[in-house]
Amino acid sequence: MIGKRAKRPEMEEKQLDVDASMQGNMVFKDPVNLKINGTFEGSLTTKGNLTIGETADVNADIIGENIIIAGRVTGDIIAEKTLKLVSPAKVTGDIKTPNLVVEEGTILHGYCHMIFDEAALGKLNEKDKRGLMSLEEVAAYLEVDPATVSSWADSGRLRGKRESSGWKFEKALVDEWVKNEKIK
């Protein structure tokens, strides 16, 4: 019909392909197809699809909907829908997702929590920091020297996360470690 505008087709999905070194906290509030091929350090929260390419080296906590990892990631990952680890992926950190696909040839060093309760998954996204202890707090809690706790963490005996502000430990994991008599 003359004078009437044709309906616009659905907007094409937003795509962002990053092949650079980046640092900071990135938050995507609208769905996007994000692919990281370079290095990234900080934190990343995204909706839509996130792909960490084979050449990527990411040191960040990640929250997303659908995540595919083929590169190296150091940090905790929360995938609200699906997390897929594709060879030669190397992930060091805890993962939480209702759906996990792990291909042969990938490496996962951390804990995996399969979450099916949407309410529980929603609470995880709030990044509840209660229960985290500093190196000094763990040393006081265990009644040992901070250098000893640092040595345990550096060697991987005591599981913690190194952040820019220093080591952070989950109290529940410290308690479990003590219960299992790993202190020598």
Image: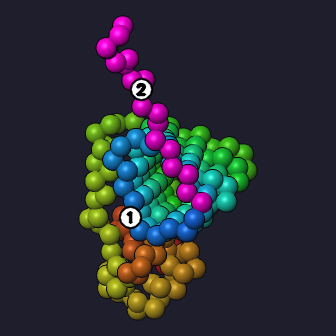
- Queried whether the magenta region covers residue 4, the answer comes back as yes
What x and y, as percent, mark residue 39?
57, 66
Q: For mark 1, what is the residue?
A: 25
For image coordinates 26% across by 65% down, the residue present is: 130
Q: Is residue 75 visible?
A: yes
Compared with 163, 78 (above or below) is above
In the displayed structure image, the side of residue 85 where residue 115 appears, left or right: left
Magenta region: 1-19
Q: Nearer the viewer, residue 111 or 1?
A: 1
- Queried whether the magenta region covers residue 163, the answer comes back as no
How dense is the environment of label 2, judged by Cα within 10 Å: few (below 14), some, or many (20 and up)? few
For image coordinates 41% across by 49% down, the residue present is: 46
Q: For mark 2, what is the residue?
A: 10
In the displayed structure image, the side of residue 130 where residue 112 appears, left or right: right
Query: Which corner quadrant of the image does residue 115 belong to?
Result: top left
- Nearer the observer: mark 1 or 2; the answer is 2
For image coordinates 28% across by 48% down, the residue present is: 123
Query: Which corner quadrant of the image does residue 80 belong to?
Result: top left
Mark nearer the N terminus (1 vs 2): 2
What x and y, as percent, mark residue 20?
57, 65
Q: Is residue 109 visible?
A: no
Q: Amino acid at mark 1?
A: Asn
Q: Residue furthest right?
A: 105
In the displayed structure image, the side of residue 170 where residue 20 appears, left or right: right
Q: Amino acid at mark 2?
A: Glu
Q: CA distance from mark 1 to mark 2?
A: 30 Å
